[in-house]
Image (tube, rainbow, N blue to C red):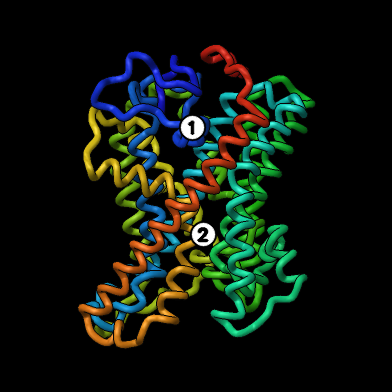
Amino acid sequence: MLSSSADESFPSRSRSLNQPPVSRDSLPQIEEAAADSFPREIVPLHSSRVFGLDLLRALAIAFVFIVHGLGPLKSHLPWWAGFLGHGGFYGVELFFVLSGFLIGTIIVRSGLKMQSASNVFVFYSRRWLRTLPLFFAILLLNVFLEPVLRDRTLAAADIIRHGAFLANFSGFHMNFFGESWSLAVEEWFYLLFPAALWLSLRRTNRFDLAFVVVAMAFLLFSTGARVLSAQQLGATWFKAERMVVIYRFDAIMIGVLSAWIAARAPAAWRKYATLCVILGSLASVVLYASLWKVTNHDITWSADSFFARTFRFTFVSISFALLLPAASRWKLQRENFVSTSVRAIALWSYALYLIHTPTILLLQRYLPLAWQGSTLPATGMVLLEIALSLFLSALLYRYLESPCTHLRDRITPLRERPAPNAAVVV
């Protein structure tokens, strides 16, 4: 997102005239992806954001939106369009790997500074000011909309459980705002992983050893817990194993370990980028195909097998992690309409993830059913859903998410960055 020699708060004076200036709104992702110990190829010169990572983020939210927003067109699409139905699953899994990679980058860059409780607190403050204000705003919106959309009033215990990210911590008990299940996984990761790393670094000064051991411990714990859960009566891969916090840390840890590999083996990261993106793309297609079975032009979910509940999650995450070497080095010499649109969607993706479902439900509830009666009106309904969701997410980013991020930068400014490779302790 910016060169390894540029200051995190200001654009480089050598910026190409073909590139837009770095705005304050671009600072959150600058923080999350610039790392001093990363090779120059990973952090493009003359750019505040890495286009490849923006593209993956935009694709992830597009996958989610397609599943939730194409309802009006469902009866007007060919049978094979049903294969889009698991796009939401893939979108969330891609978000998990991206989050692990970006947060892992921050922590690898911090290195032995994570021995300090005050620095861990700064990390918490910055993460929570970045994610929680918007989450709580949309949580309240969902509370107010529940009587409208489902004709019921929520109990205070349900609201508190959701607000504390406990509704799906060890079992799935979410009865509203269901799309927030993935936020719970991420917030618990933000809390637990730095704390565990801090405890480990209290016993050793070998940062790399502590980092890898802690990351592998989280990965193995979640995988093992999922294996045990998969054997229980009534377990299903789609909810029981997919949406429970303690079963999903491994997806984020694969991204975290990818960040460590990128920092510690930059030559291999660069050399094998093309091979990795080919293997990752092929693997993701094969694994997606395993989600379905087709009988007489009728598409249904594949068998809820032991593999589906356990290791398919792991392989999906690895397939997405294989895209990161190429994506993290993909820079643009100049912007165009398409790249600018991709960057905007990536920038708004968090708000779009949270606001699109209530927007779609309200439109489908109050617009006449005739909008869904034939192909053209149904297409208009879907386009309206897209336009309104994008508009609202842009407003939320501009007037809530971005101001909170700027407040964060004033309250807990970034500490002085370490010299290149200063955090390398093996």
Mark 2 secondary-structure assignment: helix
Asked whether the viewer can see residue 224, the reply is yes
Q: Residue at x 61, y 46 (%)?
A: 219
**Of the residues shown, which amino acid type is indicated by label 1?**
Leu
Quadrant of the rendered image containing residue 321? top left
Q: Nearer the viewer, residue 217 or 137?
A: 137
Screen quadrant of the N terminus: top left
Q: Residue at x 37, y 60 (%)?
A: 63
Q: Where is residue 414? Give x, y as percent.
A: 61, 25
Dot 1 and dot 2 residues touching (CB under 8 Å): no
Quadrant of the rendered image containing residue 197? top right
Screen quadrant of the C terminus: top right
Vertical relation: 221 (above or below) 295: above
Asked whether the viewer can see residue 223, the reply is no
**Label 1 belongs to which residue?**
27
Vertical relation: 361 (above or below) 211: below
**Label 2 belongs to which residue?**
354
